[in-house]
Amino acid sequence: MLRDRNAGATQVQPTTPVPAQSIRFRTPVVETPGILILIRWIYRLLRLVALLPFRFPIAVASATLAVLVASHLGWVPLAILATLAGAGLIGWRWRWPHTFRSLVVLRVLAAWRWFWNYRRHWQPVLVVAGLAESYQERQYLPQIRKVTCTEWADRVRVKLVAGTAPADFEQRVVELAHGFAAPSCRVTVLGPREVVLEFPRRDTLADPLDALPVPEEVDLTALPMGLREDGQTWRMRLHGTHVLTVGVTGAGKGSVIWSAIRAMLPALADGTAQVWAIDPKRMELSYGRSLFARYADTAEAAVALLETAVAEMQERAARYAGKQRTHTPTTDDPFVAVVLDEVAFLTAYHPDRDIRRRAENAIATLTSQGRSVGFAVLAALQDPRKEVMNLRNLFPDKVALRLDEASQVDMVLGEDARDRGANAHLIAPEVPGVAFVRLEGSPVPVRVRAAYVADTDIEAMADEYGPRRLCSVSGEGVA
C-alpha cells in the first residue's frame, strides 16, 4: 500500500459497479495445458534442427563429415583430417588474411555475439528500455533477424512489432548502448518494419591522427580530412557546397580548417584553387599566410574581403549566364574557398552595427549564390545560437565537434541527430578533432576524426608551397 503511487486515492474494486457502468467484463484466464507447452517446445527444437544447415552450413557440414569419418574410418583418419583442415586454415590466414578474417573470423564472431551479447540479454534490455509491447495481456518483442560483424561494429538487424515505428528505437539509443555494453548505438531504417542497430565494439577514433600526406591530385569534392569511425578515410566535399564547423574552444576546429587547406595544396600551387582567409584572432591562420591569395585580420579588412568575393562571384555568374551551369576550376576561373575563423566576431560580437550588417549580408549572398560558380565558404564557430549566427541553414554540410549542451546538437545537425546517435555534447575533451558530420541530403550523421596539422606541418607547407603571388588584404592595407 505504501508503494502504490495511488495510495490515499479512492480505491474502487474491479467488480464494484460505477454509475456509468453497471456491468464490467473481465478477460477470462485460461490455464494452458501442459501437453500444449510440451508440443511447443518440441516444435521449436525440431525447427532449430531443421534450420541449422541453412543458418550455419559450414559448421553443420564439418560436424556431419567428422561424424561420418569417425563412424566409418575410425578416430585416426579423423585426427589426420582435422590436422589437414587446421593446416589449411593456417595457410589461408597467412596467405590471404583479409578474406580469412571476413569469411571466417567475423562470421564466427557474429555467431558468438548473437548468442552471448544479444540473444541472451534481448528480452530484459528491451523490456527495461520500454521497447516491449503488450496486447491482451501478452508481451511482444522485436525479433533479431540477423547479426553481422564488421571490423569495428556489430550490426543487428531487427524486425519491429507491427504498429511500432523506428522512432521508438531512435529515442532509446542511449538505453540500448548501455544495455548491450557498447560505446554508442545508431539506428538505420532498411524498410517497412526493418531496422539495423549498429553497436561499435571499440572506439576506433581514440588515437590522434597525424597530418595526412599531401595528395598528388586534388579532388575538391572529396578532400582527405581524417578518419571515419568505420576505418575509411573521411573525405569532405568543398566544391559545390558550404561547410559550417561548430565546436567549443579546444574541440579541434583548426584541425578541420588546416586539413582542408592541406588537401588543396597542389591546386593552390597550380592556380586552379585559392584560399581567401579571415583570421580575427590572428593566431590560427597567420602561420600559413603565404598560402592565401587574400588575407584579412581586422573587421574592416574582413568585410572588404567578403564584399570583394561577392563582387567577383556576381561577375563570374554574369559571364556564365546562358552559357554554363556548373563551374570547372581553371587558372582563369579558380575555385575560391573563403575560410572564416570565428565568424561570430563579424556577425555578433563586433561593436559596430554596420560592420555586422555588411558581414552578414555578404556571407548570406556567398552561401546562397556561390556554389554553382565555384565559391565556397568554410566557416568556424563556437556558439551556434541564432542570435550569434542566424545563417546556419545556408550551410548544406555541417561538422559538429564537441559542444556544451545537447540543445546545440539540434541547432547544428538537426532535431533528430541525437536520436540517430550524434551526441556531440558527450565527446570527451581528451579527443580533439572528433566530430559528427551531416551532409546535405543524408539524414545519418557520421562520426569522424580530423587529422591534426601541427605548427611544424603548417610551416613546412608554407615553405614548400609559398610564398606565392599574393594579393593579401590586412589591417594595414594591401600587401
Image (cartoon, rainbow, N blue to C red):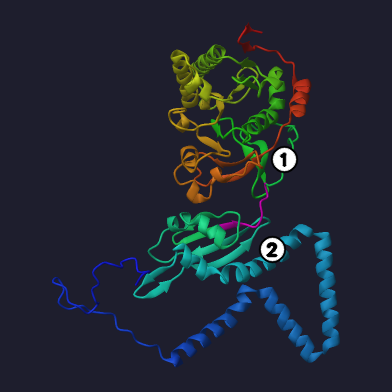
Q: Nearer the viewer, residue 466 or 180?
A: 180
Q: Which residue is mark 1?
A: 209
Q: What number is the disc on residue 310? A: none
Locate the C terminus and report the quarter of the image it occupies: top right
Q: Which residue is mark 2?
A: 106
**Residue 381 in magenta stretch:** no
Q: Quadrant of residue 381?
A: top right
Residue 322, position in %: x, y?
47, 21
Above or below: residue 24 compared with residue 188: below
Of the two numbered discs 2 and 1 on the same chain, state the one appearing first in sequence: 2
Q: Amino acid at mark 2?
A: Leu
Res 272 visible: no
Q: Quadrant of residue 75?
A: bottom right
Side (left or right) of 106 relative to 2:
right
Numbered range of the magenta stretch: 198-205
Q: Nearer the viewer, residue 399 or 60?
A: 399
**Residue 199 in magenta stretch:** yes
- Report the Cα–Cα distance between label 2 and label 1: 26 Å
**Main secondary structure along the magenta-highlighted residues:** loop
Q: Quadrant of residue 376?
A: top right
